[in-house]
Image: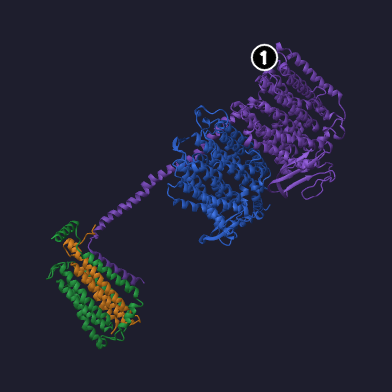
Amino acid sequence: MIVSQFLVLASLLFSLGVYGLLVRRNAVTVLLAVELMLAGVNLNFIAFESVIRDSLASGQVFTIFVLTIAAAEVGIGLGIVLLIFRNRATGNVDELDLMKW
Amino acid sequence: MSWFDNGWGLSLVVFLPALGAMVLLGIPKAQETAQKWTAMLFTGVAMVMSIIIAATFEYGSAEQFQFGTKLSWIPAIGSNYNVGVDGISLPLLVLSTVITVLAIIYSWNNWEEPHNPKAFLALMLILATGMNGTFVALDLVLFFIFFELVLLPMYFMIGIWGDKSERTLPVFNKVVENRLYASLKFFLFTLFGSAFMLLGFLGLYFRSGEVGAPSNTFDIPTLIALGSENAFGSGTFAFLVFGAMFLGFAVKVPMWPFHTWLPDAHTAAPTVGSVLLAAIMLKLGSYAFIRISIPILPDMAKQWAPAIGILAVIGIIYGSLACLAQTDIKRLIAFSSVGHMGFVMLGIATMTDIGINAAIIGMVAHGIITGLLFFLAGSMSHRYHTREIARLGGNQKLMPWLGGVLAFTAMASLGLPGLAGFWGEFMALLASFSPLDGLDLTLFRTLMVLGAIGTVLTAGYMLWLLQRVNLGEPKPEWDGREFHDIDMFEWMAWAPLIIATVAIGVFPNIVFGATRDAVVNLVQNAFGG
Amino acid sequence: MVNTIALAQTVLAVVEEDGAVVEAVELASGGFFAQWAGIMLLSPFVAFIAIILVGKRMKYNGAELAVGAMALNLVWSSVLFVSNMIDGIFYEVGFVVADVGQFMGRPLVFELGFVVDGLSIMMYWVVAFVSTMVFIYAVSYMQGDVRVPWFFASLSLFAGAMLVLVGAPNLIQLIIGWEGVGLASYLLIGHYWEQKENSSAAIKAFLVNKVADVGLIIGAIMIGRTLGDFRFSSIAKAAIAQDEALAGIAVAAGLLLFFGAMGKSAQFPLHVWLPDAMAGPTPVSALMHAATMVTAGIYLMGRLFPLYQNLAQDAREWMVPIAAITLFAMGLLALVTDDIKKVLAYSTVSQLGYMMVAIAVGGYTAALFHLFTHAFFKALLFLGAGSVIHSVHSNNMSDMGGLRKYMPTTYRTFVIGALSLAGIIPLAGFWSKDEILGVMGVEGYTSFMWLAIAGAFITALYMTRTVALTFHGTYKGEGVPHESPRLMTIPLVVLAVPATIAGLFNIPGVSWGSIGNFTSWIGARIVPMGDYHPSSINWGLATAGVAAAALGIALGWSLFGRDARTQQLRDTFEIPFLYPLLRNKYYIDDLYMRGLVNPIKGTVAKGIDFVNGSVIDGIVNGAAFLMGAFGRFVYQGFDQRGIDLAINATAGGTSRLGGALRFLQTGKVQHYAGAFVVGAVVLVVGFVIFT
Amino acid sequence: MTFGDWISEPTNWAFLVMAIPLVLAAWRVVTSRNVVHAALSLVFALAALAGLFILLGAEFVAWVLVLVYIGAVIVLFLFGIMITRAPIGMEAELSHNKRWPAALSALAIFVTTSWLSVDAFGTTKIVDVGVPTSTEIIGRSLLGQFVLPFEAVGFLLLAALIGGVTLARRDDTPADEEAREATADAEAKT
């Protein structure tokens, strides 16, 4: 078992997340894609951790942090989505172009 | 009191007024009494400390900088906070602190429009810091900062509290408001000179490392030590540096033909502003000649001496003649300053110990006497609401004491022997009879004669002024008007000046005791004689 | 630091600072009164300040203080005067008031102090004596006048300055006193300053003296800078020793100092201020403009006599003619003047000419002797004139006449003074004038001597005219004249005494036992004067002088003696050409006013002011306006149309570019995210490729 | 190392067993036309990921992943989907039609990162496969060395909690409030 295989897998997960991020219209699914990207990152952390194995288990600790932040992000993100939906009656990100010129 | 001797005393003299200005800013605008007492307290303590410095000064070694300190300040350019007094700066420092206090006393109940004592006092205190600092700074950067610091308060003093009348500029037919015109002219003129002065300082700085200093330096004592070996030589570089500094100092003195800001500024300034301007600020330029130009660039000083002497004497004659044509009492006094500073510069131009001593006592005397004259002119215009000589007359009858003091001061100003003004004039002439070896004897003796003729003209305009203002019957327009004679605050402000005029006149060693050794040392270092 | 040059008969030494014995002189030190003579110099100043402060509240408006100070001086100087008669005194002390630097290897110092020797003691005494008399006289004369306390304060100031002047041990202090008396003169001439003529006269006096002071100051500077020392004793010793450096400048310096003396002693052509100075109260004229202050020039010449005698002989070529012109020409002016005080003023100028010519030809004693006697009789005459004026309230002789009957004391004393002035034997004036004539003859100035004799004739003529017009004939003025009060007549009588007998102290060849004579009194100097002293009376010259005076009196009496014709005669004394010349005072005043003062005050000053306002300030303002214009050009031409154009073009371009690019700004999150991703990839790839 | 060597290692079989469903599930997450399906696919993907974590010895993290994500976050998502009334059934417009640029971007990312990873680490072996890291180590680490970030993250979470509440709360207009107060008053009276 070599580390590269995990790395490539992580990168694949991340890329799929990116694809989803760019291609999805529904805000909730965009958030799902983001979760996928975070999963790729987490895999990366754990893979390296399994190689390095330092005494602090930094990779795993960081993964926990990422998970925590992801949870927070989901909470806030869904809140925003909820608000947008409430105000504009749509959950589609491509209809949200208030920042347009 | 070792803390006092090691720089604290001197630094407090310099910075207490500025501290006072900050405290003033914290006092509500309505509490004028508190403001006055605060200003009084800070300048008063500074004055007392300067007097303590004068009292504990070691006159036996007056050529050394005492009470000084040297702290690293801007290491990147080798500039230090270096202060100290020697015999040359001591009298001027004391003069400066004393005049400031007297000015505050004078203005106690006497504020020009638009009133606002808080701002006025704050400016005055900042001005005091600038003036005191210039006299004790021993670092060119520090010197420059203090030298320039005085500009700003004075600019606002003239521009805000100044004369609000208008006049038409000749030639251009432009109507200007006196205070705005004067303040701007004063500021720009001086700044113009200062720019060149700064160039000169930078020239010295960048050359100093090449000619023997451990590194490039702004340190005045170090530069003087270099100067005594004539390290800066007598080439084009030194010529230009001297010329640049000359321009800066000459504007401040002011020497003919850079003097035209002075009558305007003096005339437009509020009374206290005129007093401080005449009494102290004009001295900054001539002091800088003595402190910086001559010892650092002795060869150049010698080379420039004839030019300085000629301009000085032109200033004497020209100022006196211009006085004869004035119709405004303050403007007349202002032009008289041009003449008197001409004597100071003539003394400096001789490059001898006697001449420089003459210059210093001339500066002190001019500070006292002309300061008093401006106080008087201010008080008179305050009472008559005019400065026009033609409308005055019979002042001696309306206000006997004021007239008497005016007569006394005019006498002192025209150089009556036995009063302070005499020594500066007489010794300047004495020195020009035999200037430094190598200077043109014929030229300087001619200058001496012309300067002596200038004293006649000085007497002429002063007596004429007295005749028109003090003597005769009061003009009908003042019939039935009650004028109050000198009040208590005026007495308190003027009495010290009157006493000093007589005391220095009778016993000039009050000044020379401090300056002599320092000046002799300076001349010997610079010219090896 | 005190530099003392103490001399005593037993010490026989001049003690310098370092104690080295320099020279032996047989003079006494004078003891207490000489060593504390400074009190004399200071007491009038004390009186001056005291009168200013408390004079108003005193019964006689402070006159008590002034008289008191002068009485103290009179007593003190009398003691010195007598001791000097017996012993000969020299004492000099100087307090250093200024060390101003190095010169000729030693410190150059200015000293204030006093010198007590024959010359200064004589002057102290004369000043104190005349001052006391005048002050007493003035108490009554000035009663009810304006500013009496100030008047006495000024008089005290004058007395003090005069004593400082005559007591000066060096040129510096002399200058201080010199200008001090000038100031007092200014203040007192302008005492009635409500009228413009009076203050103008005061200014004129001050300024003419100031012009002369230029000479004095430069002369003093030349001597001081050559010798390294301003002390008269040093100058005298150097002169006796024929000091080479001093010899080099002696003539020039001598002439410059003489020029200074010409101003104070009203020598032609700087005499113009003295007649105008009569604008002051009469006691002032008597004290300052007759007896004491105007003789300061003579005193200076006498003080520096060794210089002129030993080194500056050539200066005589200028001094003698000027003095001779003064004595003759100014006497003539007295003939045509109506104002009694101005007559006396011209007379004073003329007499000062006598003194000056005497000292110029080398007659130290003769000049100072004339100064001595002149002080008494001219003060007497002025006070007499004041008494008359006080009585008739006019200065003009055309308002007088016949006063002999009304004012007998004044008349008698005035006549004594007039005769003394005219040089009638044996009054004081005769002896001093005779001595002057004698020394002129001996020194070889014969033609000038005859001019002086002619001057004596003129003197007698105008004095006779004055006496005749004032006291004889009939009274032409208004009101009834009356004799002046006691307080005024007593000084007249007292002054008449020395005016009569003072000459006896210097009869040639006569010495009054142990007190010697005037020659020996004023010969008590640090160095011998070496001037000429006649050993016996030159009867021929004496006869000539008296004859000239008698002739003058006779002519005067015949012209003016009869009252009926006086008025007309005064007006018909119209010798063509000469009369208008005299009436207009030789046009000298006009020359000064129109040729010098008015142009300077007017044209030149205005020209300078114009230059200042229009040329120099024109350049300054022009530069400012030019900079303003340049600034406007820079702003409008360059900034607005140049730089701003570029800026605006940039801005416009940016705006248009933005207009184009804004379509990129879709507002859609995913577009941004895509761009972000692509950017990240590009960056990473770029980083990998380029490192 | 050849593919033969690689495939002969048993752990790699385990890897493939978990990796292939992971990728497929991930694919479904981003392509599914049904939001709920996408969410459930994410559950599946995360479960597979947890397996991989266990394979790499990160047991604690794996269980955290399962508990937090699968247990909580996904529930959150499902609620989100319901509340926003997202189309629950099949929907053509869940993705927009500009797929190719997105795909290219994603591909570029994948190529870049994977190439860099392989280039950098090549055949670095993972030893100690399956040896779990003790939870004690992680606990000490979290509350020792990393206590400050730990607290910070905790704070962040709290903030997110409050933020979420604030955002999701329906703001009453003043009129609404008056109306409610009026109702409350009326209730109080009765």
Q: Is residue B341 visible?
A: no
Residue at numbered disc 1: C476
Is residue C201 visible in the rendered structure shown here? yes
Residue at the spot 22% in from the left edge and 83% down from the top edge: D16
Q: Which chain is orange?
A: A
Q: Amino acid at mark 1?
A: Lys
Q: Position of residue B70 (x, y in %)?
A: 56, 60
State which quadrant residue B446 falls in: top right
Residue B27 vs C136, above or below: the answer is: below
Chain identifier, colour green: D
Residue C66 on image: x %, y %: 68, 34
Q: Pick whichever, C553 or C642, lies toward us.
A: C553
Return the x and y of residue C464 as percentages of the image width and height.
75, 18
Residue C479 at what x, y percent from top left?
65, 16
Q: Residues within 10 Å of mark 1 (few under 14, many from 20)?
A: some
Q: Identify which residue is drawn at 21% across, 84% down.
A: D17
Residue closer to the observer: A84 or C338 = C338
Q: Colour of chain C?
A: purple
Position of residue C551 in the picture relative to residue D15 (left or right): right
Colour of chain B, in one word, is blue
